[in-house]
Amino acid sequence: MVNAKTRAGLALLGFFGLIAVVGPWIAPYDPSAMGPDLLQPPSGAHWFGTTMTGQDVFSQVLVGTRGVLVVGLVAGVLATVLSIVIGVSAGFLGGAADELLSALSNIFLVVPALPLIIIVASFLPDSGDLLIAVVISLTAWAWGARVLRAQTLSLRNRDYVLAARATGERTWRLIVFEVLPNLTAVIASGFVGTVIFAVLLEITLSFIGVASISNWNWGTVLFWAQSNQALSQGAWWWFVPAGLCIAFLGTALALVNFGIDEYANPRLRSAGRGKVGFTPVERS
Amino acid sequence: MRFLLRRTVFYLVTAWAAITVNFLLPRLLPGDPVQAMITRFQGRLSGDAVQSLYVLFGLDQNTSVLEQYLSYWGNLLTGDLGLSFTFFPTPVSEVLGQSMPWTLGLMGVTTVISFGLGTVIGVYAGWRRGTWVDALVPVTTFFSAIPYFWLGLIAIAVFAVNWQVFPAAGGYPAGMEPGFSGEFAGAVLYHAVLPAVTIVVSSVAGWILGMRNMMVTVSAEDYVLVAHAKGLSQRRVMISYAARNAILPSVSGFALSLGFVVGGTLLVEMVFSYPGIGYVLFQGVNAKDYPLMQGVFLVVTLAVLVANLLADVGYLLLDPRTRREAW
Amino acid sequence: MSVLEVRGLSVDYGTLRAVHDVDLTLERGEVLGLAGESGSGKSTLAYAMTRLLPPPGVIRSGTVRYKGFDLLSLAPEQLRTLRWNDIAIVFQGAMNALNPVASVATQLLDVFRAHRPSMPRAARLARCRELLHLVGISPDRLDSYPHQLSGGMRQRVMIAMALALEPEIVIMDEPTTALDVVMQRQILEQMMELRAALGFSVVFITHDISLLVEFSDRIAIMYSGRVVEEAPAQSLYRAARHPYATGLLGSFPALRGPRRPLRGIPGSPPDLRHVPSGCPFHPRCASAMDVCTARTPVLAPVDQHRSVACWLEHENRGAT
Amino acid sequence: MNEVVLEARGLTKHYRRGARAVEDVSLVLRRGRVTALVGESGSGKSTVAKLLARLVPATSGEILLRGEKPGRFREYCRSVQMIFQDPFASLNPVHRIRYTLTRPLKIHRRSETPEQLLEAVQLPADFLDRYPHELSGGQRQRVAIARALAAQPSVLLADEPVSMLDVSIRLGVLNLLRDLKERLHLAVLYITHDIASARYFADETFVMYGGQVVEGGDSETVTQHPAHPYTQLLIASAPDPDRPATSTPTPLGEPPSLGSPPDGCRFSPRCPQATPRCWTDAPPRCSLGDGHWAACWLYEEVVA
Amino acid sequence: GVLTVGMPNGPMTENHNPYLPTSAASSLGYRYVIYEPLVQTNPVRPTDKGTPWLATAWEWAPDYRKVTFTPRENVKWSDGKPMTPADVAFSFTLLKEFPALDVHSLPIDTATVVDGKVEVTFTRAQFVNELKVLQTIVVPEHVWAAVPDPATYVNPDPVGTGPYKLKTFTPQTTTVVRRDAYWQELPKVPEIQYTSYNDNSAQTTALASGTSQWSYVFMPNYKTLYVDKDPANNKLWFPSGLGIHGLWINHTVAPFDNVALRQAMNDVIDRDAIFQRGEAGLFPKLESPTGLPRPAGDPFLAPEYVDAKHEVDVPKAKERLTAAGFKLDGGALKDPSGKAVTIELTNPAGWSDYLTDLDIIKNDLKQIGVEATVRTQTADAWTTDFSNGKFQGSMRWTDTGGTPDDIYTDVMNGNQLRPIGEAAGGNQGRYNNPEATKALEAYENATDDATRKASLAVLQKIMVEQVPMIPTSAAPIGAEYTTKHWTGWPSEADPYAPPQATLPNAIQIVMRLSPAS
Ligand SMILES: Nc1ncnc2c1ncn2[C@@H]1O[C@H](COP(=O)(O)OP(=O)(O)OP(=O)(O)O)[C@@H](O)[C@H]1O
Ligand SMILES: Nc1ncnc2c1ncn2[C@@H]1O[C@H](COP(=O)(O)OP(=O)(O)OP(=O)(O)O)[C@@H](O)[C@H]1O
Ligand SMILES: [Mg+2]
Ligand SMILES: [Mg+2]
């Protein structure tokens, strides 16, 4: 059922999930503790080497996994919920409500994300992971809402929705139980996309010094590496692992996304390897 | 026509709301331009400068936000975007005019390349589902999942510092004066190679993926089967029947991303010291430069909305089914 | 003389066998009707003959001979030149059979571009106009897009396209379902006139027995992936031999004449995943015998024009 | 007996993009009777059904349920249920049959079980745990009927409930409907392209053309003695294996554009018997006796 | 033959106004090779006598409310006109009339030409501002008198007395070339290119590759990043002026109003670690407990502190705490009321050196049981919170000047006290000590050295004993430069000027440069 790509993605994701849970316990050092070995390349004692202040990069990456996953998932969930509420309502209700909600999502689409994030982060006392997740989701929902609205527009006049209405279903039930389940694929791939976006944005924010770097995450690791110009110093071990982790996490999510697509779209599922137009002749 | 009119009104309202938000956003930021400037200089500008700066930026007079809003609109309508604080007293329009061509050049071209390349690969991968081309798709997603700055910095470390085949920073050589000479154009191209390639590498996967999935879906449509039945060549079926229909959803995405081109990309400009608008905005935000921020927001907002409108129109032109509704 | 000969064709969708060991012959200039329950594999058969079956369909066995070529062993390029030039298809849903973003003219011209590369453009255009005129559509519709045409017109455009290269065979899969009878008749009568003029053969698939009897020369009845009876239209209508065919004929109401009682067929169609052993129809068959549950009858001629796959016939035959 | 359950008066529906889909349609559905609606594709039959089900708002005209203006939609749909034209589109692909059938039972607080509903349409109970895509067209159509019946409505609007089925399954479904009509005294609106089945199953038949009802009356009379030229054309065109070899002349021509219909009789451009008056004035309803009527100038004298 | 200067300041717009801190001329520093000050002073040696520049002599009234300049005579503007005393007076009047141009907020009263000399009077004593007054640049009256609003004037065609004139401007790079004539010997550098990079890392790369020859940029490890790339030539010198960085403490937050606690904290904070790790060896080490960097502060040190050195002393800190009623209870410090002592240290996210400092401080404070947490904010939020007194502890700088007054005013001037929630321009830690305020006033307005010495001693005593703020590093006036192409740079051995290219002294340095053989 689940194809190889998806399995690989799920396995990778499960691995990161495991690290997120047990990372702080299995980390060999306190990631903030400044040891005596300054800027050492990878060795038996420090698998990913050490930083300028003698911190253990491996422990930082391990401990930082949780923050990344939490921000990614929370932002993904919030943005997805927002985009569903606004996009699907706009598409389903139509009329003035639609125009209003579409305008709202268009505005959020054009309002630049960076200042918005800075503003919101400035207003709240503690710019921790959760706050960043909330802010990221604020900037990330609009695109999904547009896509969902378009999809909903095409779904809302489907016969099965009309038929459910004809049996006397209430509007909210039509939206939640008739329209939404058919958007699963779109929502799921939107969710995966948002999670990738949120992870990248969080890391970027840490990197350019907007987000909090009080807690360890891969972005924080990269922030310290970059502000100490690790690459120019030849300390690739400080810069490379966190970046690769992000890339692998993103790839894992994208691979899972392949699976979601094929699972929810029967055409993709059954199309197999066959080529349209020339039915294979396979005599047994 | 009525459709266009309705869309236009819709966009005007959206533009008004977005511009108002853009006006309010900077003012919601804590602090003020003078304090931000002092902070930015971190002691290299003495505390005494505060007074002169308030006078300089004209912030010593008290005006209500409403008054500011009204005069902002007044100025906007006369095309006056005000004077930037960061680059005081350079007019915002001049700051924009100076950085916009670079942004448009680099981002515009790479967006087009990325879209073109991604679409072609996506069409092929979708058409030859299950072959090696298709297997390439996860690889490209790997690149799109890399944080851009990481890719850029590694590229600099490898190609600019280690091998020294491309310059590490800037849009053109430091001593050269911009002009319409072949030499300058060559230098600009040379400096653009590394940023452009990294942008394309990190953004092409999105187009590939979208196009591929649409191709797979469209390939199962009846009219593609009919095209096969008609005995048309594979190329013709792939391009005129499958791809021509599959590209429709990508088009509006493309138009939108062209709109966002105007905003530049902070990361590219930071990593490669490229003289674009993204970094200017970043400076403006850090400096509480209301006029500059508003100016950039305005341009981005308008560009995105116009791109949106163009996407609508483009859709009308590309998809005959929607034409009837429009005219 | 037969133009198309199908022998022992079997088609699978994954583990499911949708067409089972089918033999069929199409004579030059004749209309062969194909009827049967829904899901009995009619469309699958028609597409498999030209290897146009979309995935996951796979042809498992058999031959399809056209003018001496085995279509199933041709290389794609050879098959491509043969398609439409010799065998054209009018698909079930004309709504989706036309490329929504290309004009009628483009789609018609495409056929000439692919198969008549040497034909001058003016001649091609002239031919397109002529074709539209042939099916009763004003030639200035050439520049229209599919959505600007009504369902009936789209169907007729498809017919015009099918005839563009004067093919030997036209396959029509439920070309008129969802159209009202007036439109249906218009289209079919045109088709028949053209057939008389051009002399091509037609495979005509529909659920509407009345229509089939009225328009086709010979009828094959399918049940559960197999052809169970094949006979000239009128003789099948007057006296069907296979119990399923008899059941079908007893199930449709007549518009004219006295109201006759409708008998119907008891039971429900088999699930293709769990086909009953022996004759697939035996659970619903009033005259089922022991042998029917054990062995599958094969399609065999019972007289000069008629073949039936039923143990009743075979035992008769065995007795004679 | 046979009292009016649902009545439509002067129903009109213009779609936003100018399609005048339904123009001044009046209909009466009675207890225990099947009323057939036939006509060309796109003449507005489905729109009439949806208007009657109050799924689309009417541009003008009114609907009376048991002689009264209907109240809240939920109460209304308890009495009036609809079967949609396309069984592939009208069952939500993500829900099991059980969900689809349980919902109306819950909404209308019926005490039956979904198993009983399936039994009524002669489907085995193990279908409850299947998804729609695991069902054949005929089975889907029966599920759709079961859903409509779950509310125990007094009116059933059946929009081409058998179009996709082969004749044997078709017969089963129609027999089921007839049985329901007789047992439960259901009023049924039966929309179809299959005129022969209208003859067999419907008590009365109405013929629609271009958004208007052009003829109505007892089914046998309408099918055997069609009065309106369009009905005549329709009957003549219907496939018939016993048809004499001489085929009927059928006018080539295109159906009316609903965007800008002709001024007078909408059939006039295609009508072989059209007179100048037909082009300019809309014809009145002319009664032909026994409840049989036609909207055509040809029968004006009969009225007079 | 070109000198390339780099700054990590981002793209520029064409603006050569020498007064505006926002102009490219100020940002990149080329204003000081086009315009010149009256006197060159050396902030690294603030008490040294200034070098006469456009003024050949100057004389202060004893109360420091008046200064008389003798303008140099044979000076010509780059447009050929001679510089006159009127130009000098005009330059002061300009500052008075347009406060927007006056970044030092000098209280100029009058500026008049008397007998070819220029007399400038002030409404307040300018002893502590002496260097700022002397460094005032001179602009041509014939150009600037006609400018309606000098504050919005971009000065497209700058006319100055300096040896260079503008050649080309691009947002990336400004180029100036040597003039044909100058009032003294022409410098040997024919052309200077000022390039702006977008960030520190790009600037560092440019320095390392030799694209930039002279810059001031913070680098986390100058040895590997810069010096090692060309150990013979790549040099840097980071001297200190009279300005410091330190941990500001909010005195309105209990128990930090307790002097014993502040002293104890001061005792355990390891300034050496901050120097080495936090400030990458670039911010000079601050050893004097008075908070005055050395050697710039040497002439000001009170006798009792001349040899005093700050040392980390954990036992002493614990002693102090116990004596003041604090209890160290299982590793956690409890204040006399029994509450655990915790402190939240805040700084903007992105200021990596300060954040490293805070991390070090956090670890140090743990030794006396103070539980510190580090929290980052956006730069704006931090700026606002800091000036509004809504913080517990933060790393920040003080002003830099020619006397210790700039440091001490910033840290403890009671006149700058504002209630919590109201923005304060200085004394953001809300240190309230009338004695300090009085001493500051006395120092600023004194007319004799004895008074000055006495009040300075008081201020230093307060700084040492009350610890209103915990100094950690000196503020550097440093730069990186390469001797590959040009030699003659200022250095520890020859500290004739601060090495930065953006200070008025830049022209002094350029004058000394000669091609490397
Ligand atoms: N893609 C598929 N995967 C699995 N089974 C399929 C697929 N397509 C068709 N089938 C099955 O194959 C059988 C034959 O289908 P086919 O479309 O040929 O029937 P048909 O006789 O044309 O029916 P209809 O009259 O409804 O058009 C059906 O039982 C159907 O369920
Ligand atoms: N939602 C809609 N918006 C605009 N026009 C519509 C809409 N629905 C139907 N129409 C138009 O209204 C007319 C009547 O459609 P309707 O579906 O009622 O016809 P019908 O008689 O049911 O046809 P068929 O026999 O093909 O089912 C058609 O011309 C159709 O194009
Ligand atoms: Mg079929
Ligand atoms: Mg209909």
Image (cartoon, helix red, strand yellow):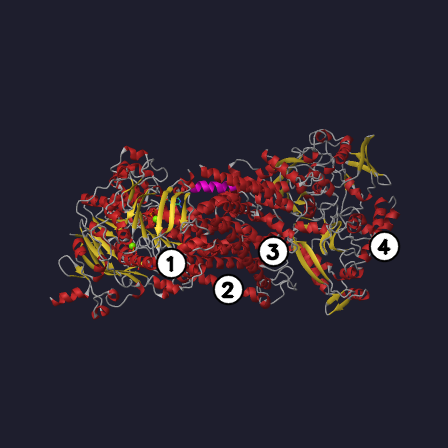
Q: Specify the subunit that label 2 lies on.
A: A
Which-is-in-front pick, marks 3 and 2?
A: 3
Q: Main secondary structure of the magenta part?
A: helix
Span shown in magenta: B305-315
Q: Position of residue B48 (x, y in %)?
A: 75, 43
Which amino acid does the dot numbered 2 rest on?
Answer: Gly
Q: Position of residue D145 (x, y in %)?
A: 36, 57
Q: Is residue A35 visible?
A: yes
Which-is-in-front pick, marks 4 and 2?
A: 2
Q: Using the image, tell me which numbered label, if any, was put on residue A14.
A: 2
Residue B311 inside the magenta-drawn segment: yes
Q: Is residue D139 above or below residue A158?
A: below
Which-is-in-front pick, marks 2 and 1?
A: 1
Give the quarter of the image for residue D229. top left
Q: Using the image, tell me which numbered label, if any, was put on residue D149.
A: 1
Q: Position of residue E488 (x, y in %)?
A: 70, 45
According to the picture, the residue beneath numbered tag 3 turns out to be A131
